[in-house]
Amino acid sequence: RVRAGFPPNAWQTFSLAVKNRTDDTIIVLEETSGSTATFTFDAGDEPPSMRAALGALDVAMAANDLRIITLEGGRFIQSDGLITGSIVGGGKIMAVRTTRKT
């Protein structure tokens, strides 16, 4: 588990400690206010994110929507190993690290 689910306030920023890896991380987004929300994931730093020039990602959520997403590490990881972003509206975000089998 990377970080427990937490409900950011409207316009609040968040960070997910993914330790420079996203290939084993699932991100769960939930709109909880019965209205709409937009989760914005910031573009990463270059390096380590060689595709940071593609910019931020906005995920628009309908009322009571639930989504499970993965993010490309080459686009969203900051130089400190975090994924950062913000939310407009009411919602929760949770990142879960999956088990890696080799």
Image: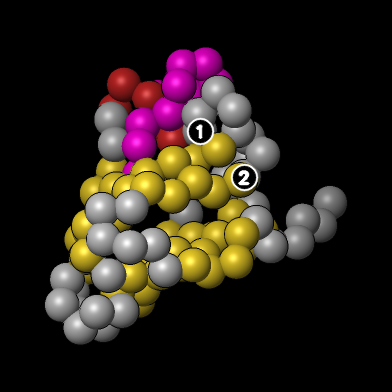
Q: Is 98 located above or below residue 43 in the figure?
A: below
The residue carrying mark 2 is: 18
- Which range of residues does the magenta coloring cover? 41-51
Q: Is residue 63 magenta?
A: no
Any mark on residue 25, and which? none
Give the quadrant of residue 88: bottom left
Q: Nearer the viewer, residue 45 or 33?
A: 33
Looking at the image, which residue is at 61% across and 59% down?
3
Number of marks: 2
Any mark on residue 77, and which? 1
Give the residue type that dot 1 points to: Ile
Q: Is residue 85 left or right of residue 4?
A: left
Q: Is residue 96 left or right of residue 36?
A: right
Q: Nearer the viewer, residue 88 or 49?
A: 88
Q: Residues within 10 Å of mark 2 (few under 14, many from 20)?
A: many
Q: Residues within 10 Å of mark 1 (few under 14, many from 20)?
A: many
Give the quadrant of residue 48: top right
